[in-house]
Amino acid sequence: MSTIKVGIVGCGKISGIYFKNCSSYPNIEVAACADLNVERAKASAEEHGVAKACTVPELLADPEIDIVINLTIPAAHADVCLQALEAGKHVYVEKPLAVTREEGQAILAKAREKGRLVGSAPDTFLGGGIQTCIKLIEDGWIGTPVAATAFMMGRGHEHWHPDPEFYYAKGGGPMFDMGPYYLTALVAMLGPIRRVTGSTKVTFPERTITSQPKFGKMIQVDTPTHVAGLLDFHGGAVGTIITSFDVFGGAQLPRIEVYGSLGTLSVPDPNTFGGPVLLKRHDAKEWKEIPLSHGYAENGRGLGVLDMAYAIHGGRINRANGELAYHVLEAMHGFHDASDEGRHYLMQSTCERPKAMPQGYVFGVLD
């Protein structure tokens, strides 16, 4: 496979792992990076050995760039994706796909118009942990999936993140920040969602930053910070999800469990790529840890970009694709709409369960 050249837009906190991992794949070259703060782009280029640091328009105009990796803040996701697609680039964006459903639809429509692929984080479900869970479900180890639970409980980001305001703006909050990991994993295991309902609240209308460099600054909270949702999957399973920035602790709850007619599967943290994977069959007294059946168990952020590169060459759909990301985006809005309007929200979109990752792990080879 010939080398695919990528350009990174947005050189903030999350970019480091993308620079590192994408530079390690044999078929990808990080050829350029850009940021609104060009000096920050230059610093990232120097740190990671990238040949070109430039403005965003310059990167989008570069004819050698095949894929734009969009690592901007959520409010800018749609604008940068649309510009990249208009420039004839494939685009891979950090989660969520966009802030609004209308923006997400516009991204998918532009990609169809231009004949380009859209990809979106999270790609953690491509890692060995959740891929092992998918195989166990498909091989019948827990029988027919009946239900699932998912919990992401914490106190928020203002006590540790250097720039936490956007987590409490529209498009932020625990559901839009962390929900994509959990919902993407559930869809990858159980298939698309038919309808959702939910309850949401803002517990603390203001928050005080206690991290540096903005210690003491007040944040106005403009998005729900505790979201409890129910999901009905097309396959028949019923899911429960809670995401919260309003609680202390929560570590005693499982991240995700899937309950079947023959057993229960404890799924590893969907914000990671590895295990442990635990199984308790109906005829067993104890939980059993299952060895991972797939590779990429370390922090593999950027694996979705590698898969997109293979998809471009092979003429197939990428696994962490735009339709999957939009389906998750719609579900997240559905929880909020259902709470505001006192009803079930019927999903308008659907998606295919992504194709399983290959076994027989060879680093950097997906097809």
Image: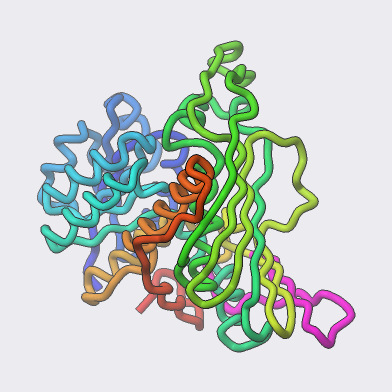
Q: Position of residue 274 (x, y in %)?
A: 61, 64
Q: Is residue 252 above or below residue 281?
A: above
Q: Which stretch did the figure color magenta?
A: 275-296
Q: Nearer the viewer, residue 20 or 340?
A: 340
**Residue 46 visible in the displayed image:** no
- Quarter location, residue 32: top left
Q: Position of residue 42 (x, y in %)?
A: 30, 30
Q: Position of residue 74 (x, y in %)?
A: 38, 38
Q: Residue at x 50, y 82 (%)?
A: 359
Q: Residue at x 38, y 35 (%)?
A: 73
Please identify the residue farthest to the top as the structure is shown.
216
Q: Position of residue 119 (x, y in %)?
A: 32, 58
Q: Residue at x 43, y 60 (%)?
A: 346
Helix, strand or loop for the magenta stretch, by majority? loop
Q: Is residue 362 above or below residue 77?
A: below
> What quarter of the picture does the C terminus occupy?
bottom left
Residue 44 inside the magenta-drawn segment: no
Q: Residue at x 46, y 41 (%)?
A: 14
Q: Nearer the viewer, residue 269 or 301?
A: 269
Residue 285 inside the magenta-drawn segment: yes
**Residue 362 visible in the displayed image:** yes
> What quarter of the picture does the N terminus occupy?
bottom left
